[in-house]
Amino acid sequence: MDKLDHQLAPSILAADFGHLTEDVRKVEGICRYLHLDIMDGHYVPNISFGMPVVETLRPYTDMIFDCHLMVAEPDRYIKAFADIGCDMITFHYECSDDPFALIDEIRSLGKKAGIAVHPDTPAEKIYQFLEKGAVDLILVMSVVPGFGGQKYMHSATERLSDFRSRLDKNGSDALLSVDGGINTVTIKEAAAAGATLIVAGSAVFGKEDITGAASDLIAAMKDC
Ligand code: DX5
Ligand code: ZN
């Protein structure tokens, strides 16, 4: 396997929403992606934030907005999140009757399309998206979606390795993302298994020294 380009995507779910732009400033010099967790209190039991927060933040940074929709009926919200400046829009496989139609819609809006997979969903269901060009990002959940600060599920590592080898075999250049329970130890495991876009909330914005915490995570996955 060629050496992969591993990127860190800090999740603002763990940020101080009273000082959101200041928190984002602390990572924008060292990270290109910013992960936005949208939770609807329906697909997941928690409610996070929605369009007004994303729209307000957009003019303050050039970071790539990696929008993770944990919402039922994602087709109802794709256009809204595209219009307010999300660059990548990921929806849950479990929430869509016609995922390929949604991928097409996201791409037709000029955005990158991602598909997220719940830990309980069999990996085989996702194989169709590992074909070359099928999707731009695969998001492997390493916790049950809905809350930050949970423990990394090691079963995600095996899933990442499986998806990595299938993506490579198919010649797909889709990003392989992982989300949940990432810290300076688990990031090595996920990166070594082939994840390229690694999301971390508590391990970045939950720390006193946000820039230092993001740097430590980037350093930890450097040689994986
Ligand atoms: C969980 C969210 C995650 C969350 C990760 O459902 O999708 O993106 O912010 O938080 P940590 O890194 O604290 O597990
Ligand atoms: Zn997320």
Image: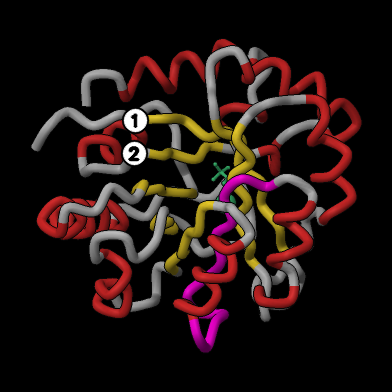
How many numbered marks does the figure carry? 2
- Secondary element at image label 1: loop
Task: Check disc 2 and give the amino acid type.
Answer: Thr
In front of the other: 63 or 17? 63
Q: Which residue is mark 2?
A: 196
Marks 1/2 in contact by CB < 8 Å: the verdict is yes
Residue 59 in percent (x, y) is at 82, 30
Residue at 67% x, 80% y is: 73
In front of the other: 30 or 199? 30
Quadrant including the C terminus: top left
Picture layout, residue 209 above or below residue 200: above
Residue at 83% x, 54% y is: 51
Picture layout, residue 214 above or below residue 108: above
Task: Check disc 1 and give the amino acid type.
Answer: His
Determine which quarter of the picture holds residue 55: top right
Residue 13 in percent (x, y) is at 70, 43
Q: How many residues crowd mark 1 within 10 Å: few (<14), some (14–19), many (20+)?
A: many
- Secondary element at image label 2: loop
Q: Which mark is residue 47?
A: none
Q: Which mark is residue 6?
A: 1
Q: Which range of residues does the magenta coloring cover?
A: 86-98
